[in-house]
Amino acid sequence: MAEEDKKYSRQIIGKTVVTKSGKRFGEVGNISFETRTGELIHIILKNPTSYATEVDLEKNDKNELTIPYSAVIAIGDFVVVSEEDFA
């Protein structure tokens, strides 16, 4: 990954999470990662929409909705996720 392609967590937190078809899930509240490797594991949602609560998303130990980071397909003005990768 080129240096200019890297995203820091502070650049992602607070962005709106949407699907490829434009359905909103909420906002990025936090990101969980593997401390040994730095691998990003989940996006933790804040202010989840009613759509996000209807979808069968995993919850963490704090009962927060999470989306696997592997489902992220683009980060720009929004964080775009592929529902097929977690639904």
Image (cartoon, helix red, strand yellow):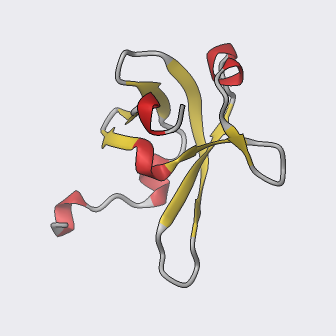
- Residue 70 position (above or below residue 34): above
Position of residue 25 relative to residue 10, above or below, is: above
**83 lies left or right of 48:** left
The quadrant of the rendering that contains the N terminus is bottom left
Residue nearest the observer in this picture, 14 or 1: 1
Q: Is residue 27 left or right of residue 39?
A: right
Q: In this view, does 45 lie to the left or right of 23?
A: right
Task: Relative to 44, say whether 2 is above or below.
Answer: below
Residue visible at 84% across and 50% down?
62
Question: x, y (%) of residue 11?
Answer: 42, 51
User: Residue lying farthest bottom?
Assistant: 36
**Residue at 45% across, 25% down:** 18
Q: How many labels does the image show?
A: 0
Residue 23 horizontal/vertical position (percent): 47, 16
Q: Residue at the spot x=67%, y=29% of the render?
A: 56
Q: Give the position of the C terminus as an image quadrant.
A: top right
Quarter location, residue 61: bottom right
Q: Which residue is drawn at 30% across and 38% down?
A: 76
| Residue 79, quarter of picture | top left
